[in-house]
Amino acid sequence: MELKTVRLEFPEGCNIILGQSHFVKTVEDLYEAMVTSLPSPKFGIAFCEASGPRLVRRDGTDEEMIRVAEQNAKALSAGHSFIIVMKDCFPINALNAVKMCPEVCRVYCATANPVEVIVAETEQGRGILGVIDGEPPVGIEGEKDVEQRKELLRKFGYKR
């Protein structure tokens, strides 16, 4: 077995949801989860099929986001993994719908941070072991940091 890291590449300001599923129906169900969770979402989905034709299946509402999702899925090439790349919207608004999708087994991350995916490769194929999401903390928040966090949540409309 060989361990590798794959850095996901997506445009600044975009968010991703990376997960594992188990069935070709995933693409259609994740599409429905996204469009019913967000008003006019811009996103792309790519899913690495693990048997049969073993294609990268894709869908979405935005051609650029579909291409970005395809490129990342191909770079990962991990069986039954999926990636949703979205712009002008946030994972928090669709994450529960994605997790409730009957085919979804696991969500590894939902983020706008730089992501490295730890992949194991064997003779059979590739699998995701985990992710490195962003960078490590540099300290503990102080009172000013607490105020800034609360202001940010209110700016995004998540708190009043």
Image (cartoon, rainbow, N blue to C red):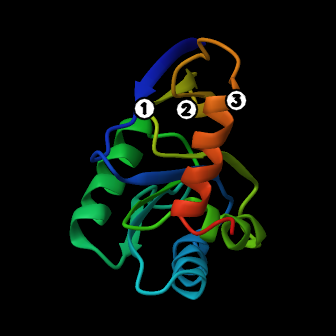
Left or right: 132 as drawn, with respect to 100: left
Count neighbours of disc 2 (C-alpha within 10 A) and say few if under 14, some if 14 to 19, many if 20 or more: many
Q: For mark 3, what is the residue?
A: 143
Real-space Cα separation, disc 1 to disc 2, in angstroms: 21 Å
Q: Secondary structure at mark 3?
A: helix
User: Which of the 4 image quarters holds residue 29?
Assistant: bottom right
Q: Position of residue 145 (x, y in %)?
A: 62, 31
Count neighbours of disc 3 (C-alpha within 10 A) and say few if under 14, some if 14 to 19, many if 20 or more: few
Tag nearer the camera, 1 or 3: 3
Quarter the N terminus occupies: top right
Quarter the C terminus occupies: bottom right
Q: For mark 1, what is the residue?
A: 114
Task: Count every numbered label the image shows and give the total.
Answer: 3
Q: Residue at x 62, y 31 (%)?
A: 144
Residue closer to the observer: 111 or 48: 111
Count neighbours of disc 1 (C-alpha within 10 A) and say few if under 14, some if 14 to 19, many if 20 or more: some
User: Which of the 4 image quarters holds residue 96?
Assistant: bottom right
Q: Residue at x 44, y 53 (%)?
A: 15
Identity of the amino acid at label 2?
A: Arg
Q: Position of residue 104 (x, y in %)?
A: 71, 62
Instruction: State whether residue 115 is above or below residue 89.
Output: above
Q: Secondary structure at mark 1?
A: loop
Identity of the amino acid at label 3?
A: Glu
Residue closer to the observer: 87 or 84: 87
Q: For mark 2, what is the residue?
A: 126
Q: Position of residue 148 (x, y in %)?
A: 57, 41
Left or right: 7 as drawn, with respect to 100: left
Give whichever of discs 1 and 3 has the lower sequence position.
1
User: Which of the 4 image quarters holds residue 7?
Assistant: top left
Give whichever of discs 3 and 2 has the lower sequence position.
2
Identity of the amino acid at label 1?
A: Pro
